[in-house]
Amino acid sequence: MAAASAGTAHKGILGRKLGMTRVFDEKGRQIPVTVVEAGPCVVVQHKTVETDGYAALQIGFLPRKPSRVTRPMQGHFRKVNVTPRRILREFLWDGETPALGAEFTVDVFAAGERVDVTGVSKGKGFAGVIKRHHFSRGPMAHGSKYHRRVGSLNAGTTPSRVFKNRKMPGRMGGRRATVSGLEVVRVDVERHLLLLRGGVPGIRGAFVAIRTAKKAAHGAVQAKG
């Protein structure tokens, strides 16, 4: 599988966030990293341009009891003679296509590569505009009534309503989010571990999708989900 993906512009793997720690480079500088248990994953389906309009691979992660899978999905897995998987995701693939049922591990990536990591961000419950949207607080004088509140929402008589998508208090987090341009610091093939510089979305144990970065980036950029 590693040889098949060596020349591809797109590749990916599914994993589970284990937490954060730090490692040291050859100069003794500490690097904050997120440890992700990635793979082994199995190829479940081929998406082709002729049939589906695009080329991609559907891959599965973590075995699941057949009794916990619906009959249509059991047939889906039976076609390629693999045990049911808990997580299924699609990844663009424009190189040599691996065979159905083929397994691959973290060796599809190498130290120094850049990746995009997608997951579900931590849910933080109901939050005000300062925490949720980084508003500045109002004056703290005794006469002020807008210390941490929203402030003006719109004009009065016209339009006499609040427009959609106005930044207001509400539920924060718990949404799909992507961190772009993370550097792969280390690859531990024996323990199926990827060490990525910086943080990734989600709580400990959250599932994440790791793809080849769409564009090279010096540092991570948080994309709102």
Image (cartoon, grey):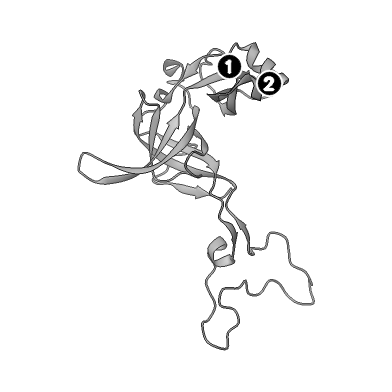
Residue bearing mark 1: 83
Residue 3 shown left or right of residue 99 in the figure: left
Residue farthest along the bottom direction in this orientation: 143
The quadrant where residue 49 appears: top right
Looking at the picture, how far across and down is residue 12, in whole percent? 50, 28
Residue farthest along the front direction in this orientation: 67
Of residue 179 and residue 21, the one placed in the foreground of this image is 21
Residue bearing mark 2: 73
Q: Residue at x 27, y 46 (%)?
A: 30
Of residue 74 and residue 185, the one placed in the foreground of this image is 74
Q: Residues within 10 Å of mark 2 (few under 14, many from 20)?
A: few
Q: Residue at x 63, y 16 (%)?
A: 77
Q: Amino acid at mark 1?
A: Thr
Query: In the figure, 16 relative to 27: above or below?
Result: above
Q: For the residues marked 1 and 2, what is the alpha-carbon distance in whole angstroms?
A: 11 Å
Name the image quarter holding the N terminus. Answer: top left
Q: Amino acid at mark 2?
A: Met
| Secondary structure under the numbered disc 1 in the rendered image | loop
Query: In the figure, 130 relative to 11: above or below?
Result: below
Residue 138 shown left or right of residue 71 in the figure: left
